[in-house]
Image (cartoon, rainbow, N blue to C red):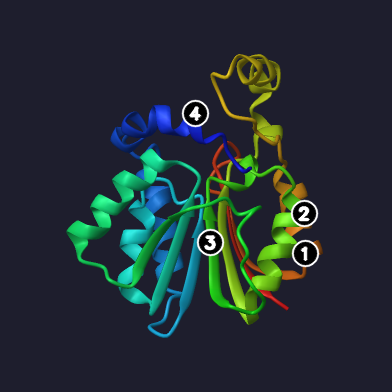
Amino acid sequence: MTRNPYFWDSIAEQYAALPIRFPDDYHHKLEQTRGRLTSHMRVLEFGCGTGSTAVRHAPLVADYLAIDVSYKMLEIAEKKRSAAGLANLQFMRDAIESRSLGRAHFDLVMGFSILHLVRDLDAVLRKLHAALKPGGLFISSTFCFADHAHLLRWILPVTQRLGVTPAINRLTANGLRDSVQTAGFTIEEAWQPAPDRALFLIARKT
């Protein structure tokens, strides 16, 4: 499973209350994503958390499915969906590894702050590629721990064994780009505002 649901259930309320760490980065990614959305699109977001991104994007597309492994996160997300009155947005509890996506079913798939948490990155990327229609888009934002978080290399194994933090893949930005391209995508945009910030990718199924 992508993430331990019990860990994320336990921090859902605190997570929802956290301020956005880099608001300028976040809004730039929102704008870039929104610029790719059209009213006919069928969209999948995996690792949706408390649904903030889904609620912002869903009004611009035809159908939006957002999944996460945490019941508590999804309870918060559903409250946001209900308050916004979004009938085309559906939240479901599931992991990207276990969910059946079909073939050529979605126009766009997105995953923010989630690729470093999947067990088998290459398998997930191949699955996403198959689930997209020809020419479909994959949009992601990923913190690549192995590049700059040198202290975390020593701390994370300990905190993971203690259950304080979830299992994290220590990705590099170059390695992530290579994996996305190997899965059959062409990267159209790669944006990283600073070396210690998340790598934002927009890639197209080729």
Which residue is identified by label 2? Answer: 122
Q: Residue at x 70, y 16 (%)?
A: 154
Above or below residue 116? Residue 93 is below
Which residue is identified by label 3? Answer: 110
Camera-side mark, 3 or 4: 4
Which residue is identified by label 4? Answer: 7
* Disc 1 crowd, CA 10 A, few/some/many (<14, 14-19, 20+): many
Q: Quadrant of residue 72?
A: top left
Which amino acid type corresponds to the residue marked 3 in the rendered image?
A: Met
Q: SS for tag 2?
A: helix
Give the mark, 3 or 4, whose residue is nearer the N terminus: 4
Give the Cα distance between marks 1 and 3: 15 Å
Give the mark, 4 or 1, whose residue is nearer the N terminus: 4
Q: Which mark is residue 145?
A: none
Give the Cα distance between marks 4 and 1: 30 Å
- Whether pointer 1 and pointer 3 mark residues with C-beta atoms closer than 8 Å, the reply is no
Q: SS for tag 1?
A: loop
How many dots with numbers?
Answer: 4
Residue 83 screen position, x and y as percent: 18, 57
Which amino acid type corresponds to the residue marked 1 in the rendered image?
A: Ala
Above or below residue 50? Residue 206 is below
Which residue is identified by label 1? Answer: 183
Q: SS for tag 3?
A: strand
Which amino acid type corresponds to the residue marked 2 in the rendered image?
A: Asp
Which amino acid type corresponds to the residue marked 4 in the rendered image?
A: Phe
- Whether pointer 2 and pointer 1 mark residues with C-beta atoms closer than 8 Å, the reply is yes
Give the Cα distance between marks 2 and 4: 24 Å
Give the mark, 1 or 3, whose residue is nearer the N terminus: 3
Give the Cα distance between marks 3 and 2: 16 Å
Give the mark, 2 or 4, whose residue is nearer the N terminus: 4
Q: SS for tag 4?
A: helix
